[in-house]
Image: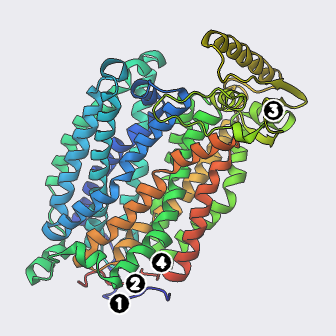
Amino acid sequence: MAAIDNTSTGSAPHHGITKEERKVIFASSLGTVFEWYDFYLYGSLAAIIAKHFFAGVNETTSFIFALLAFAAGFAVRPFGAIVFGRLGDMIGRKHTFLITIVIMGVSTAVVGFLPGYATIGVAAPVILITLRLLQGLALGGEYGGAATYVAEHAPKGKRGYFTSWIQTTATLGLFLSLLVILACRTILGTEAFEAWGWRIPFLLSILLLIVSVYIRLQLSESPVFLKMKEEGKSSKAPLTESFARWENLKIVIMALLGGTAGQAVVWYTGQFYALFFLLQTLKIDPQTANFLIAGSLLIGTPFFIVFGSLSDRIGRKGIIMAGCIIAALTYFPIFHALTQYGNPDVFAAQEKNPVTVIADQSKCSFQFDPVGKAKFTSSCDLAKTVLAKKAIPYKNEKAEPGAIAQVRIGDKVIQSFEGTGMPAADFKARNDAFVATLGTGLKDAGYPEKADPAKTNYPMVLLLLTILVIYVTMVYGPIAAWLVELFPARIRYTSMSLPYHIGNGWFGGFLPTVAFAMVAATGDIYYGLWYPIVIAVMTAILGTFFLPETKDREIHHT
């Protein structure tokens, strides 16, 4: 398959930035920041939300469920892209992203009022997931509209720079959500915040919604869209033109696999998976972890503009492909270093006294219990349950068929027990004793319950997190301009939105869940990194060979 190209050249680059252009960038970006704030609140509070809305299952499953609910919002983003992309290509960019921001703001605010599992039972997670789906639909229409709108206002030669401001909004939205959470947690105290104060950031969405709607009402329609309408060239069937005609569909497919899929996994690894890793694996205090992530975002965010502007000079594709390759090559050493500097006790214990589960592998289950009814009673499952709950890294070793599982910690071996068929009272007593014995063994071997703040090397952790954010800016800063330039104006909103939201909604949005499940299944705290590495390498190969450079392309063609 040859590289897809339909390059045409236009007028010379325009220099300077007018007051109207500044207004377009500011208004579009600020509204989108608020929308990302709404969307990311859930991800930042996933651990607390798990306790309030998924309390009917075991601890590991409840967290995976919370991550799945987080991912549910991403899962429906492509459908939002189809619905609102079609509207945007038919009735205009401005009206469409006014609708999306209202849906997002209202859905987020309702979460702040929603009773938990203890009050209304299973209805709580059902309603919560429904609200997440509405958020995802709204976001599916938001990004494509904002990126298209800004790009179509940008002078040639500055589209990368103009749209890079839109690219900052996702990170700034996450940053704003972290700041609000930190402020509420600090003012209320951890106990009150986790009991009820977590609702306040969601309720603030009502105020942000009012501001956002007011700002967007001040905007005029895209000049490219108005020109198409005047000339009668706007699409009457954007879905058919985008996805039922091979000449455009092949660009959509390659934009996904050779562009947004890799961009998405690099983005979500650098921001969300890094946060989950600090919290769940390294057991760093939540407030400290949020401060570290916020600090890395603050330092790294200007690089969105740097790489967006650079893409106007040297091209979009090379920067994005380089970001994917560099990330794939360095994720393992970076996350090993995060463990070494973030929780050196775990790193040292893992080196000195590695943990191994020796068991009949046929008796070991994948410990994901979607209905809360599974009974993990085999000797292997009982050992892995304790280790998973304590986030202890371990390896697996095969034992003879029927053998009782053992946990080897360095040179010490602790015998598990077979709980299948055991009376409930006896099982509880044996299990309590086993948990206590294993806990003592892990403690003696140097494995801590939580990261010791006095031993955490904060400057090094901040540096490593900032490097991860800079990878994000490399792949994400130029991609809006690249996607806009790949498609003709008449179907641009629809065509660019779908690959963007499948990439970010599915490949990226499911990353924390998939990676966490991979870790839970293997006991290797770094095993989940194979998911973003494989996807990033795939994108780098396909994007390099099958997608064109577009920085000199004229985008007014229909």
Identified at 22% across, 60% down, the residue is 84
**Chain-order first, disc 4 or disc 1:** 1
The x and y percentages for residue 172 are 41, 48
Amino acid, disc 1: Thr
- Mark 4 vs mark 2, foreground winner is 2
Amino acid, disc 4: Arg
**How many C-alpha atoms fall within 10 Å of the one at disc 1: few (<14), some, or many (≥20)?**
few
Could you give the CA–CA distance between mark 4 and mark 2, rounded to whole angstroms? 10 Å
**Chain-order first, disc 2 or disc 3:** 3
In the picture of the structure, the residue carrying the numbered disc 1 is 9
Q: Secondary structure at mark 3?
A: loop
In the picture of the structure, the residue carrying the numbered disc 2 is 552
* Left or right of residue 331, residue 231 in this image: left
Amino acid, disc 3: Ala
Q: Tags 2 and 1 in contact by the CB under 8 Å rule?
A: yes
Could you give the CA–CA distance between mark 1 and mark 3, rounded to whole angstroms? 71 Å
Residue 142 bears which disc, if any? none
Amino acid, disc 2: Asp
- Mark 4 vs mark 1, foreground winner is 1
Identified at 39% across, 27% down, the residue is 53
Could you give the CA–CA distance between mark 2 and mark 3, rounded to whole angstroms? 67 Å
**Quarter of the rendering containing residue 531:** bottom right
The x and y percentages for residue 8 are 35, 90
Could you give the CA–CA distance between mark 4 and mark 1, rounded to whole angstroms? 15 Å
**Chain-order first, disc 4 or disc 2:** 4
- Mark 2 vs mark 3, foreground winner is 3
Could you give the CA–CA distance between mark 2 and mark 1, rounded to whole angstroms? 6 Å
In the picture of the structure, the residue carrying the numbered disc 3 is 403
**How many C-alpha atoms fall within 10 Å of the one at disc 3: few (<14), some, or many (≥20)?**
some
Residue 313 bears which disc, if any? 4
